[in-house]
Amino acid sequence: MIIDTSAIVLKTFPYGETSLISRCFTKEKGKVSFIIKGARSKKNPIAPYFQPLSFIKIIYNEKEKRDLQIVSKVHFIKIWLKITQSLKKMTLLQSILEITDFSIEVNDPHPELFKSLIEIIEIYESDSINSNLAFWLYESVVLSEIGFRIDLEDDSYESASHNSLEIKDEDKCIYILNNLINKNFDKISFKNISSREKKIISNYLYNQLCYHIEGFERLKSFKVAKNILNDLS
């Protein structure tokens, strides 16, 4: 079956002497792995399309019994120009890609999560809200997508976290998270969030993900991302 779908590249690595394997989050089919034969050859211009974070359109002939699909055509949908100029944004987005890769199964479409991922990348590109807030928002979206939507009005929410700083008695943190989840960004002043409050919010969301997604604590990029999220800048 011919599949024509938009996709975000999650991860790409060398295969053999000249090929690449690229894992992509596609809108139509969820997570799909592709083999791009000869991509590392100097005469083949296809490799740039499969850099992590690339927003591309892929056409391929799906073979259900094949673990690695073969790309027929590919082109860019959009090129992010400003994101690559910021080490902080690139670091946080690398972690977001890793969270996405770890949270979804192969060939399991998540169209709403795909839409949210594009929205978050657009936020980083346009600087429409603070980078930390965007990261927290995506964490909450992932939790919702896998069936654990954060409900801070429910007194039982704290029991679903472990090894975290208490949030249930932190009215300001709850206020920030509620408005973030509901995308009321104008009600949040990031510069007025203290380092302690950042740590409480960051740890709460992280521990929720660790509780609901087995092995989440092993994600390497998250250690660096947490240092950024807890920073005052």
Image (cartoon, helix red, strand yellow):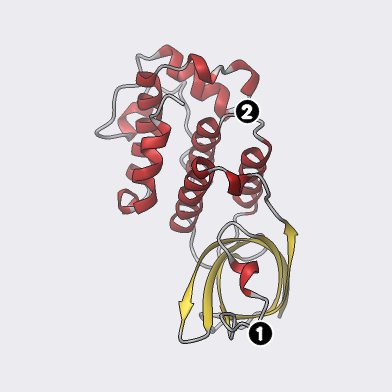
**Residue name at image x 64 percent, y 38 percent:** 123
Which element carries disc 2, helix, strand or loop? loop
Which element carries disc 1, helix, strand or loop? loop
Q: Is residue 208 left or right of residue 150?
A: left
Q: Is residue 98 left or right of residue 158?
A: right
User: Where is residue 129 shown, x and y percent of the image?
Assistant: 62, 29
Name the residue that disc number 1 marks: 43
User: Where is residue 22 shown, x and y percent of the image?
Assistant: 54, 71
In depth, the one of 232 and 148 nearer the eye is 232
Q: Earlier in the sequence, mark 2 or mark 1?
A: 1
**Residue name at image x 50 percent, y 44 percent:** 87
**Residue name at image x 47 percent, y 20 percent:** 153
Disc 2 to disc 1: CB gap under 8 Å: no
Instruction: Kindly identify the amino acid type of the residue bearing the numbered disc 2.
Output: Lys
- How many numbered dots are placed on residues in this image? 2
Classed neighbour count for the residue bearing mark 1: other residues with Cα under 10 Å, few (<14), some (14–19), many (≥20): few
- Give the quarter of the figure containing the N terminus: bottom right
User: Where is residue 124 shown, x and y percent of the image?
Assistant: 61, 40
Q: Is residue 172 left or right of residue 26?
A: left
**Residue name at image x 68 percent, y 77 percent:** 45
User: Where is residue 28 shown, x and y percent of the image?
Assistant: 67, 63
Residue 183's disc number = 2
Instruction: Kindly identify the amino acid type of the residue bearing the numbered disc 1.
Output: Lys
